[in-house]
Amino acid sequence: MRDLLIGIDAGTSVIKSIAFDPGGRQVAAAMLPNSYKTLPGGGAEQDPARTWKDTAETLRLLAGQIPDLASRTAVVAITAQGDGTWLINSAGEPVGQGWLWLDARATSIVEEMRARPEDRVRFERTGTGLAACQQGPQLAYMKANMPDMMKRAATAFHCKDWLYFKMTGERVTDLAEGLFTFGDFRTRAYSDDVIEALGLSDLRRLLPPMIEPTEHCGGLTVEAAEATGLFHGTPVVLAGLDVICTATGAGLMDRDSKPGCSVIGSTGMHMRLAEAVADVKLNEARTGYTIPMPVPGMYTQLHSNMAATLNIDWVLGLARDILASQGMASGSKEMIPLIDRWIDAAPPGSLLYQPFVSEAGERGPFVDANARAGFIGISSRHGYADLVRAVFEGLAFAARDCYAAMGPLPSEIRLTGGAARSAALRRILGATLGANVRTSSREEAGAAGAAMIGAQAIGLYPSMEDCVAEWTTPLLGEAEIPDAGLAETYDRLFHVYADAHAALRPVWRSLAELRHH
């Protein structure tokens, strides 16, 4: 009996294979760490062969927890980190390492492209701002600096496309990632104008066909069956990039409530639903993403902070170092109650924090690879608790900045990601946005969203809305209502935050020039 659906989520740091029953309840999970290397000049690369080997191993580990997994698997659906460039040759072997979304080598190319008049055309077609994390600028960099490698390349993949290829032998990409990088979201096809604007007309041969995830199934090859322990011919679905799967699993597709959806993980993803092409709102700054959802005619618009919990990790790391030097425990469980006490002890809005701690700068709602984190307003009266609170407030202001770039602020936020477990963050985010906050009891929204798309592809549900009603809606918690007084404070402070990062941009550029000399 094929009664299990497996969602694979190959993230930047962890690869997960998770089994669900047909009603969306998690049965078992297996995961392995996923490592990458950073290189001088902003490079960030992952080994394609190792990523495939570890993905296959998670399926074997899952089989160790579930008797007869192979005979019970109805579908395997794959999602993974978005953006990046994974090249293969005509024989299907990797050409170099996989470039990640963290890779910043194409930064100067992006600045040049954004200054050209034709970037306006590219943006209006894709509905997506240009950033160094994307495959278009990365291919342009490779073309200019690695011509021998490009001659060997036959197909340009993203991480999930590579894994799907290894499982099925098919060279395809999903409609979502293909469109926001090289296509026209209105026609849902590759755009010659976009490809030309990127300077890649001669490399169009590398772009694989785009498929609609809910309408296309591959079959597990003999080689992949041997590697994974599953049966030859098992249906395999290319579910799409992780942000779309997470939005699906976290509850963005709610036509009645029209919520926003925020993923507060290593990066911050802030999404709104556009039910039709006419609902898509493009901003003057030419930033953000427009991505089709796994429902015909429906889109998500999103702006993504380059760093979210990376800021929390940094500020808590200071305390961990001090505690460890005194021989005190400093694990995550010990830190959580400390965080709440620190935030409660500090007055709101005492400091401003710009949460741009990533070495790659910022990409949403503005693009600036030189952006860097910093505190504004420190005096001798401030202590560590004030710093912690300011970091959490900075993440909330960054979220509001993103939502404001897409139109009116949503009245409800569906919150997911590692930081969603923090009551302090939910309280601060809700007040900053003036929105109710709801979280899901489901921890693995990305893998669940992939499995939901897989369920639709094999005809398990008549529509994605029916799947959402069973898999997602029942797991949503009660709405947490924002504190009115706190909301008033943050409403005033947000405008100062936005003015501050606008004023700091020439300072960041000067600092970058000094670092490069």
Image: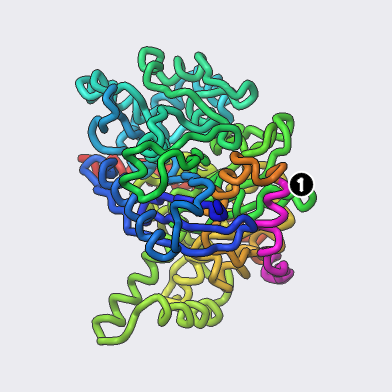
Q: Which residues are magenta?
A: 465-487
Residue 36, relative to residue 443: is it above or below? Answer: above
Q: Nearer the viewer, residue 443 or 56?
A: 56
- For disc 1, the marked residue is 255
Q: Secondary structure at mark 1?
A: loop
How many marks overall?
1
Residue 129 visible in image:
no
Q: Nearer the viewer, residue 380 or 102?
A: 102
| Badge 1 amino acid | Arg
Q: Residue at position x 37%, y 65% from top?
A: 314
The reply to whether the magenta stretch includes residue 203 is no
Which x, y percent locates residue 512? 31, 43
Q: Main secondary structure of the magenta part?
A: helix
The reply to whether the magenta stretch includes residue 473 is yes
Residue 218, relative to residue 376: is it above or below? Answer: above
Residue 13 visible in image:
yes
Which x, y percent locates residue 471? 65, 56
Q: Residue at position x 53%, y 48% from top?
A: 74
Residue 253, relative to residue 84: is it above or below? Answer: below
In this rendering, position of residue 433 left or right of residue 325: right
Which x, y percent locates residue 96? 23, 33
Q: Residue furthest bottom?
A: 327
Which x, y percent locates residue 293? 62, 39
In this rendering, position of residue 109 left or right of residue 94: right
Q: Residue at position x 51%, y 33% from top?
A: 174
Residue 445, relative to residue 128: is it above or below? Answer: below
In this rendering, position of residue 269 left or right of residue 67: right
